[in-house]
């Protein structure tokens, strides 16, 4: 069973702080790694889809890297804003679009 | 382009009952996947439907079943509800089974008493 781990479980930062989370996985046997941003009572929103070792993606103040050889992906948020408060999920696409999710990192950004 | 919608938003059932949850996929998408998110866990894959056929299943018992209709909307049916079935049920649609991008609905919160 593929186990996707995310750390930390939760994080509380001040507005303007930069922060990062980790997604760890034991195997490189997957098709893609997905990052989702999920605000309470809304739909999970796709941030990035990463497929290759060394992939780096960026969207505004948020960026992500993928290291399949060592089994991790980092998500960075530069200059956090209160609207960044959400749960950030990573998931591995193991084929047929079956996503194996981690338990998420809950971020709270205080003004 | 309309997004993925789910109904109902939430519902309460008692143990032993049956429930049907509905999902309308995003326009142009022919693949729907269903996930269960229990409290404190990440979403768990239940199954996927592609062009009205089941196309992959997670570790869920047969009392979890589904349908996909010609317009690619989908239903998740759960028979003989158990307390542990209380969870948020998410559906996600994509353009094709091999497409990397999945778009999620807001979920249906099921409580089993």
Image (cartoon, helix red, strand yellow):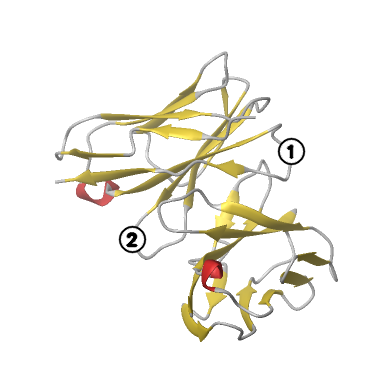
Label annotation for residue B98: 1
Q: Nearer the viewer, residue A94 or B12?
A: B12
Q: Which mark is residue B39?
A: 2
Determine which quarter of the picture holds residue B20: top left
Under circle 1, the secondary element is: loop
- Splitting the image into 4 quarters, where does residue B60 fall? top left
- Report in which chain the residue with disc 1 lies: B
Q: Position of residue A68 (x, y in %)?
A: 77, 70
Tell whether B65 sits left or right of B33: left
List x then y, in percent, for residue A12: 47, 83
The tally of labels here is 2
In the rendered view, tell whether residue A75 sits above or below residue B71. below
Residue lying at the far front in this picture: please name it: A111
Q: Is residue B32 shown left or right of residue A69?
A: left
The local crowd at label 2, few if under 14, some if 14 to 19, many if 20 or more residues have their Cα within 10 Å, is: few
Which secondary structure lies at badge 2?
loop
Residue B82: horizontal and vertical position, in percent?
Answer: 22, 44
- Rendered view: B52 above or below A93: above
Q: Is residue A67 visible?
A: no
* Residue B87 rendering spot, x and y as whole percentages: 32, 50
Q: Residue at x 22, y 34 (%)?
A: B80
Observer-nearest of A8 and A5: A8
As drawn, A93 above or below A13: above
Judged left or right of residue A45, residue A34 is right
Is residue A63 visible in this depiction of the protein?
A: yes
Locate the N terminus of chain A and report the quarter of the image it occupies.
Answer: bottom right
Residue B102 appears left or right of A13 = right
Neighbor class of circle 1 (other Cα within 10 Å; few <14, some 14-19, many 20+) is: few
Against A37, residue A17 (above or below) is: below
Identify the residue at horizontal 60%, vertical 30% (top origin). B26
Chain bearing tag 2 is B
Q: Which mark is residue A62?
A: none
């Amino acid at each position: 069973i593929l186990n996707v781990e995310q750390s930390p479980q939760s994080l509380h930062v001040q507005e303007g702080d930069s922060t990062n989370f980790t997604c760890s996985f034991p195997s490189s046997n997957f098709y893609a790694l997905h990052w989702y941003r999920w605000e309470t009572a809304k739909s999970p929103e796709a941030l990035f889809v990463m497929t290759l070792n060394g992939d780096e993606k960026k969207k505004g103040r948020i960026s992500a890297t993928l290291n399949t050889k060592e089994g991790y992906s980092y998500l960075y948020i530069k200059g956090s804003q209160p609207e960044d408060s959400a749960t950030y999920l990573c998931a591995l696409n193991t084929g047929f679009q079956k996503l194996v999710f981690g338990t998420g990192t809950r971020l709270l950004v205080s003004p | 382009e309309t997004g993925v919608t789910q109904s109902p938003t939430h519902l309460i059932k008692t143990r032993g009952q049956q429930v049907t949850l509905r999902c309308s996929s995003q326009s142009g998408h022919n693949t729907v996947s269903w996930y269960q998110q229990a409290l404190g866990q990440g979403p768990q894959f239940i199954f996927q439907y592609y062009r009205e056929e089941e196309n992959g299943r997670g570790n869920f018992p047969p009392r979890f079943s589904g349908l996909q209709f010609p317009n690619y909307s989908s239903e998740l049916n759960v028979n003989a509800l158990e307390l542990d079935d209380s969870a948020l049920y998410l559906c996600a649609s994509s353009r094709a089974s091999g497409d990397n991008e999945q778009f999620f609905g807001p979920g249906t919160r099921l409580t089993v008493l």
